[in-house]
Amino acid sequence: ILGGAFTLVMALGLPLFKELGIDASRQQLYMTMIMSPWAMKPFIGVASDLFPIRGYNKRYFALYSILIGLIGCTFLLILYQPNTASNAISAGPTAVQHLADLLVICFTCISYEGATLDILGEGKYSEYMRLRPDSGSGIISYKFGMSLAGSIITQMYVGPLSDMGYFHTLFWIALGLALAPFFPTLMGWIPEKKRSSQEPGMTKLCPGFLFDRGMFLRKRTPFIVITLSGLAGPLMAAVTTFADLEIGLIFSGLLLIVLAVITYFVFPKVVFCVILAMM
């Protein structure tokens, strides 16, 4: 499902923007914004570890992400009808721009669901591998194999349907993919230990919400850096896409410098060198 949803968003965005007459440079900015939730994975992972909801670290974070993905798919179905693109083009560049911006927000919601389910699943895989080291990396191989299968199947139909202009059909498929994890997640098919406010270091923030203060105090600095890094990508993408491009580039450069400096003083030097090379 994740492989199918990821590929659907990636493969559907470009032909859709092409139909609207969006130029190539603007398309790339839009796709950067759409994929920015995947850069939030470190932040999502930290948040789920520190803030159990109704006693569970993963279940309700996953459910909320599914809800966001469903909202994005629903608005796509309402917003984009067969004559929507032609009407926007007839109304002028401003109407096209507004329509494209709304489509980007909808696609970003779908990406957020995929990114959240992916990082929460990775956390569970890591937990199983620690408990069963004899299992090796079989579960990871299985996960990537199924994702690849979903991606291949999606590629087989997205292109032909896009060429025929059946975008509405593809939005219905996206809705089905977004909805598929809801029931298994709600029923807790992936086992998870329920946390309580009686645990050492656990604080009750409000009804249904806990805060693992003990874990935060033990790993405070890495948590803060990881959170800032996770939020940096979406912030840079949003400023560059929806504000002025030059302002976005300046903001991105300053943010990268700040993160590099923080990484140098917080993490081992080998980590700093790796992150610097990636930048």
Image (cartoon, rainbow, N blue to C red):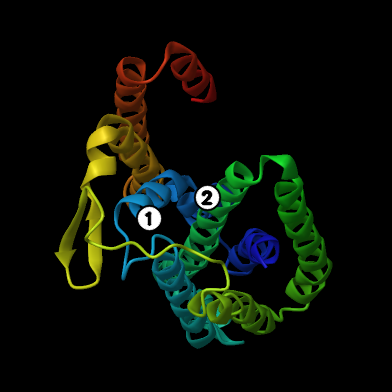
* Image point (33%, 66%), residue name: 55
* Image point (47%, 19%), residue name: 271
**Towards the viewer: 63 or 30:** 63
Q: Amino acid at mark 2?
A: Gly
Which residue has dot 1 on it?
Answer: 48
Q: Is residue 96 visible?
A: no
Q: Position of residue 30 (x, y in %)?
A: 50, 55
Give residue 80's mark: none
State the CA–CA distance, disc 1 to disc 2.
10 Å
* Image point (27%, 34%), residue name: 218
Q: Amino acid at mark 1?
A: Ser
Q: Is residue 122 visible?
A: yes
Which residue has dot 2 on it?
Answer: 123
Position above or below: 134 against 180: above
Position above or below: 239 against 255: below
**Towards the viewer: 89 or 62:** 62
Q: Quadrant of residue 52?
A: bottom left
Q: Position of residue 162 (x, y in %)?
A: 73, 72
Position above or below: 90 against 106: below
**Towards the viewer: 104 or 38:** 38
Q: Quadrant of residue 147?
A: bottom right
Tell me, yes or no, whether the two marked residues, 1 and 2, touch with CB atoms within 8 Å.
yes
The mark tally for this picture is: 2
In the rendered image, the quadrant that contains the N terminus is bottom right
* Image point (52%, 83%), residue name: 87
Question: Of the residues under marks 1 and 2, which one precedes in the sequence?
Answer: 1
Q: Residue furthest top?
A: 269
User: Considering the numbered disc 1 on the image, is that residue within a helix, a strand or a loop?
Assistant: helix
- Which class describes the residues within 10 Å of circle 1: few (<14), some (14-19), or many (20+)? many
User: Considering the numbered disc 2 on the image, is that residue within a helix, a strand or a loop?
Assistant: helix
**Towards the viewer: 41 or 28:** 41
- Which class describes the residues within 10 Å of circle 2: few (<14), some (14-19), or many (20+)? some
